[in-house]
Amino acid sequence: MDPATSLPFRMRPRAALSKLLFASALVGCVRGAEAPCPAAAPALFSIPVPAEPRSVNPVSPAAASTTSLCHPDGRPSPSPAKQREDRPFCDAFDAGEISRVEAQVRKNLVVYEKPSKLVIDFGCDEAYGTTRELVFESGSGHGGSLDLVRLKNEGSVYRIRRISSLHYDRKRLGIEVAELPAPTVDALIEKTRVAMLAQPHFIRLLDPSGAIGLGTVSFTSNDFHLRLAIVDTGGRSTERSFTGYDSSMEQETIVPMRLATEPLEKLLSTAAFRPSAIEDEDREFFTAELVRQLKATPNWWVRERYLEIAKTLGTKAALPTLATLAAAPVRDGASEARTRELVIDAVAAISGWDPRRDEAGQMLSSVEAAAAVARECSPLSDSVVRDD
């Protein structure tokens, strides 16, 4: 039993002590004739009592509004967080394909510390249903490129829409479309999903002689980005990515990603791509990828290129995520400062509201404009605090 609840009248210890002090004061004033009895017990010593928590946190009128300069038609409700299963169902792999991938991994990996043992594990293929689409991202850090390719299963064919962009001297953003036979793409996916989930790693071994043998360690200035996702009709996704420099120190991720994506790049090179106008489908697809990337804290140059493209392809569904990014502190990083400028520009292009000017039309600083974006573009849950 709780000692506090076993007292008479269920008095808490602190309440019981207060009543005792008050009773002592009353006895004293009855015995003494000079002083009148006080209305309450004198404070002999203070006992801090925590204030009761407020049921609703105070918010400013502007923040509590259901509309804003960024959302004149009403702030959106937050998207529910997508919950991943703790123990998802993993699709089975073909034994022959696993053997083929293991052989390729062993052939391509460089042993940079001897003696060691190479162990090849495999991840979980969660997209076990019929493939709905394949999403492929690629880009070059120094080359200034970023491409997003979506292969959508439409029965007998996969319809392809590619967002292609350059971000340095020859800036360009375009949409290209093509088709490939479904059996060809499906056969590639069966191989790709095994290769992308290979997880090789070296286990260091003790040398009885005590010697340490170092193999070749390679490093290049090739900074690249690869991401591949297989999405089934149930919305389940099997994916993997790598962004960084081509180095033997990162080969445990680079090798599987290249084994998975190089056949896809080769297949795409055979497709007859043709230019296309931007469609709503492109905007919706890109915005979903933008939100996913920004929530996953991507590499700095991948983030910047996504934000550049957002000025053309972003939709209002991206505004709450952009508001969160605008609220992030800018410390010493040059990319952080560029990111803030890109967020402000993207919000202006998407919403039609210029965060760089106040109500009187005067120019604001970047810090003030970013604060306005964080305030005006946040979703409903960030502006109205509900009493649970």
Image (spheres, grey):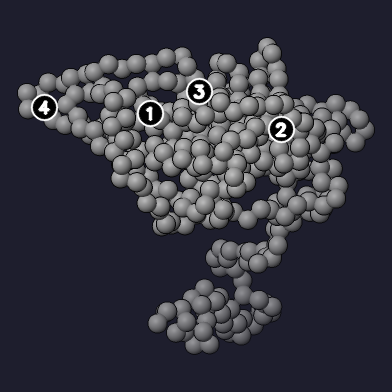
Image spot of residue 331 (x, y percent): 60, 27
Nearer to the camera, 83 or 78:
83
Q: Secondary structure at mark 2?
A: helix
- Mark 2: amino acid: Ala
Name the kind of residue labelled 3 in the image.
Phe
As drawn, the label of residue 255 is: 1
The residue beneath circle 3 is 224
* Closer to viewer: mark 4 or mark 1: 1
Instruction: Mark 2: give few (<14), some (14-19) or many (20+) Cα within 10 Å.
Output: many
Looking at the rendered image, the disc whose residue lies closer to the viewer, 2 or 4, is 2
Q: CA distance from mark 4 to mark 1?
A: 27 Å
- Residue 352, compared with residue 247, is above or below; it is below
| Amino acid of disc 4 | Asp
Query: How far apart in space, not on screen, are marks 3 and 2 (Cα)?
Result: 21 Å
Q: With 154 as the anchor, is 319 left or right in this view?
A: right
Q: Nearer the N terminus, badge 3 or badge 2? A: 3
- Above or below, 76 relative to 33: above
Q: Nearer the viewer, residue 6 or 154?
A: 154
